[in-house]
Image: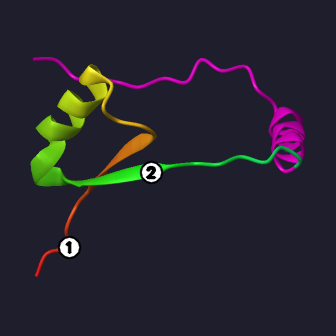
Amino acid sequence: MGERRICSVANLTRRDGQDFFTLVSKIPLRMHVVPYPLEEANQALSDLRSGRLRGTAVLQISEAQ
């Protein structure tokens, strides 16, 4: 398998970012995060595919003990 590379193709300027955050600060956003332990990644995918997930799934990586 060859190397893989990620390239950004966005044409956004610093001003675009500033304008975006100014706008976002005026909109009341409500976010819902559903945490899943990394070991339950398949369950998170299943919940997403089936429509059981309401919000954003976040995989949590436990710290090394």
Instruction: Specify whether 63 is left or right of 12.
Output: left
Which of 57 and 3 lies nearest the eye of the viewer?
Answer: 57
Residue lying furthest bottom in this view? 65
Q: How is the image coloured?
A: rainbow
User: In which quadrant of the rendered view does residue 50 lie?
Assistant: top left
- Pointer 2 residue: 33
Q: Is residue 60 above or below residue 20?
A: below
In the rendered view, would you say 54 is above or below 49?
below
Question: Given this view, does label 2 or label 1 mark the residue nearer the observer?
Answer: 2
Q: To which quarter of the image does residue 14 belong?
A: top right
Q: Where does residue 1 sit, x and y in percent of width and height?
A: 9, 17
Q: Whole-Å distance between the Cαs marked 2 and 1?
A: 20 Å
44 vs 31, left or right, is left
Q: Which of pointers 2 and 1 lies earlier in the amino acid sequence?
A: 2
Q: Disc 1 residue type?
A: Glu
- The amino acid on which the numbered mark 2 sits, given as a three-letter code, is Val
* In-front residue for pair 7/34: 34
Q: Position of residue 27 (x, y in %)?
A: 83, 44
Q: Quadrant of the C terminus?
A: bottom left
Q: Residues within 10 Å of mark 1 (few under 14, many from 20)?
A: few
Q: Report the residue at 88% width, 40% height from top.
A: 23
In the image, residue 4 sits, relative to residue 39, either above or below, namely above
Q: Nearer the viewer, residue 61 or 4?
A: 61
| Residue stretch rendered in magenta on the structure | 1-25
| Residue 12, disc | none
Question: Residue beneath label 1, please?
Answer: 63
In the rendering, at what x and y percent does residue 17 appear?
Answer: 80, 39
Q: Residue 36 placed where, x, y %?
A: 24, 52
